[in-house]
Amino acid sequence: MAHDRPRGLTRRDLLRSAGAVGAAAAVGATELTGASVVSPVAGAIAQQTAPDAAAGAPLPEPLEHLTASEAELLEAIADHLIPADEDGPGAVEARAVHYIDRALGGALSESHDAYRSGLAAFDRYCRSSRGGAFVDLSATDRLSALIDIETGAATGAGAGFVGSSAAFFGMVRSHVIQGTFGDPYYGGNANFVGWDLIRYPGVRTAVTPQDQTRLESGDLPPYRRSAYDWGTFNKASARRSRPRVGTGTGGDHAD
Amino acid sequence: MNMTTDRLMVVRVGLTVGMAVTAVFLARAQVSPDYIDPAAPIVVESPALTAGGTMPRDYTPDGHNLSPPLTWSDPPAGTRELAVMCVDFGAGNPPPWVHWIIYGIPPTATGLPEGLPIVAERAMPRELEGAVQGLNGWRRPYYRGPAPPSGTPHLYHFVVYALDEALGLGPGLTRADLLEAMDGHIIGRGELVPVYERFAG
């Protein structure tokens, strides 16, 4: 569970660039349309002009509800909850934070305040108890701080968690699991890494006896399709305010 | 005149209740059923903790939450194994709340260094080879320090047991399991009891 991985800096840089892109996109969208909603088109333009784009590096989509620092901390937490290891990729690769960020505008909108105050309290707790931001702590201190938050021991230590720190931890854990193993339609489980991790063969509308036999022997190739790629399923949306129309492809959130 | 009398009555009742609560707290905090048998005394000390002194933050979740260093001397002749617990008799339902259990400590050990592992992948120091951390009150196999409610000082009993037999206990034991396993084998005992209190932040 505890490990230091050199790619951490790269991830942080990516998230920071996502925040910058998000801010740029928001300004662009507001100037062009007067709307406060981040435009995917403006985001794409900003991404095209970002320095990393020239280097050919894939850029993440703009953040919609979390700030860059909130997303950075949340991703570091998610990385500890479901780390990439010898069994495969983890919550970061699944883009669980992307799922949470999108869902805070829809299905998880009632949790937005809890995230805002909880992540701030989390940061205050790490700084007051371990002397630095979570992402800058040693592997042992990061794990130790997480345990204290998980067990509720961080409650009342001046961090200012609303209620028990354990409640905040439980909420984050639940949402990180959703973002890692849920349907990619909702913005997480990118490239189906979560389903591959648990060897979920994918949503199937029909299973033949041969499929069943291959499934039981572990030979059934995964069917990498979102449930929403079938026209027969209703198209719910991660965003409550903007229902999605039409079909999508797994992990590709265009709305 | 009546109001003054009423206020005095309120103050008297308040003081009485306060004294009763304090007495109950002290009784819960200081009486340990483990201390009944007359095992030989062991002197328990620490370069970081003192009896009755406030625990440094680094051994609590308000700091790095490291397990504190402990030393002991004079375990009785015939000691084959040692065990250590940290318990708070002023917490838990029922008390005590268990902060730490470590057993299977070789008889050659003269203490525990600061910051024992909180991950299974990290090995115990060589001088503690064979030692195992049992489950605390959070059902975790490592030390977790004091986290009392603000405004209430708690006492933390670091108890060292000397055993007349190497019990060969496996991982995952609770305090109750360990006490049961040690029953009849405790030939020495000692403790160090520091204090910790949190203040509203």
Image (cartoon, coloured by chain):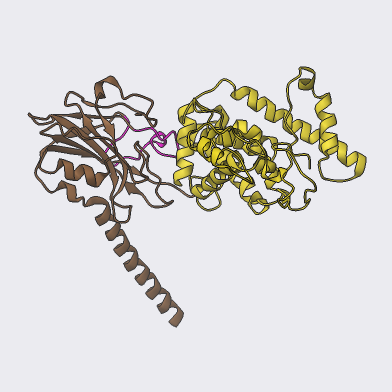
Chain colours: A yellow, B brown
Q: Is residue B155 left or right of residue A236?
A: left
**What residue lies at 44% left-to-right and 82% top-to-bottom?**
B2
Task: Give the image quarter of residue A196.
Answer: top right
Q: Is residue A41 above or below residue A111?
A: above
Mainly helix, strand or loop, the magenta region? loop
Q: Residue furthest front?
A: A209
Residue B90 in sight here: yes
Task: Give the image quarter of residue B194.
Answer: top left
Q: Is residue B27 above or below residue B41?
A: below
* Residues shaded magenta: B48-67
Residue B201 in sight here: no
Q: Is residue A160 above or below residue A59?
A: below
Q: Position of residue A140 (x, y in %)?
A: 45, 29
Q: Residue furthest top?
A: A55
Quadrant containing the N terminus of chain B in the rendered view: bottom left
Count up the numbered dots. Answer: 0
Decide whether residue B14 is among the magenta residues: no
**What residue lies at 39% left-to-right and 48% top-to-bottom?**
B148
Q: Is residue B74 left or right of residue B53?
A: left
Q: Residue furthest bottom?
A: B2
**What residue lies at 16% left-to-right and 30% top-to-bottom?**
B81
Task: Give the image quarter of residue A202.
Answer: top right
Q: Position of residue B78 (x, y in %)?
A: 7, 29
Q: Residue furthest right?
A: A32
Decide whether residue B63 is among the magenta residues: yes
Foreground pick, A36 / A137: A36
Q: Position of residue A108 (x, y in %)?
A: 65, 51
Foreground pick, B115 / A205: A205
Q: Position of residue A91 (x, y in %)?
A: 58, 34
